[in-house]
Amino acid sequence: MDLLIDLIATGDNSVWAVLAGAFAGALASGFAGFAFGAASLSIWAHTISPLVLAQMVVLCSLIGQLLTLPGIWRSIDYRAALPFIGFGLIGSPIGASILHILDPYWFRKVAGALLIAYVVSVFIAGRLPRLHHAPRWSMYLGGFGGGVVGGFAGLSGILPTIWCSMMKWSKDRQRATFQIFNISMHIMTLCVYSLQSKMHSELVGPMVLAVPIMLAGSYLGFFLYRRVDETQFKNGLLILLAISGAGLLLN
């Protein structure tokens, strides 16, 4: 709880930053089934230390994913998700290890570069012809890379998202694949943190602030997922993520 007291003591800006990051991440995750870390990192990275930040992103993202899982359960294609999950479980411990040797400066720079790369990749992939028969090794590579990035920064959905975008899967199939993959990666990452005895007690304070606002963000995001035009919301989210990534790179 010490970090919660520190956040309140340092002024309203820190508290509002935690709340804003939680809501933005939950809204994105509730709509798309991924992108909690992408939407929250640029806000939280200037308030919370990198080690606590990465663990908070993973834990909050897992909570958000589980909240909306019942709504997409019937759309999950386990045969499509298992290759991603299997190799992602190998990459996740590697990413968790990288986190503890990367200093705060490079943590922010790498996170910002990942966000920019994600936006550019999805923008390009949306204009590529449909790939009917992608090689299996590309799924394995996407899963492994997603696991590494997930263990490092809680951004496990980026590479599988790009792969599925190039396949031009339906919205429901993509979302279900992202979500079950992310849930698996987040559970694996938290297990690695726990086995390494590196779960921080300072998580309690920010989590107390974040969870209530996440409930609202997750359900609002899922409401929009069911009712708002996908293309318009996707474009708005990409713009927001690009601005967030640029903020991390420049600050």
Image (spheres, rainbow, N blue to C red):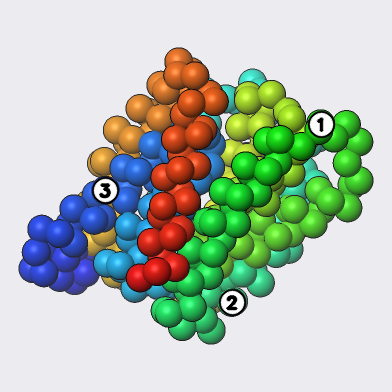
- Disc number for residue 130: 1
Q: Residues within 10 Å of mark 3 (few under 14, many from 20)?
A: some
For label 3, the residue is 20
Secondary structure at badge 1 equals loop
Give the residue displayed 44% in from the left and 35% down from the top.
236
Residue 39: x percent and y percent? Answer: 42, 49
For label 2, the residue is 98
Q: Is 78 left, or right, of 184 in this rendering?
A: right
Give the residue displayed 61% in from the left and 62% down from the top.
149
Q: Is 224 left, or right, of 12 in this rendering?
A: right
Residue 81: x percent and y percent? Answer: 74, 40
Secondary structure at badge 3 equals helix
Residue 116: x percent and y percent? Answer: 54, 56
**Mark 3 or 2 closer to N-term?**
3
Residue 106: x percent and y percent? Answer: 49, 78
Count of labels in the image: 3
Q: Residues within 10 Å of mark 2 (few under 14, many from 20)?
A: some
Q: CA distance from mark 1 to mark 2?
A: 35 Å
Above or below, 142 against 108 in this view is: above
Circle 1: residue type:
Arg
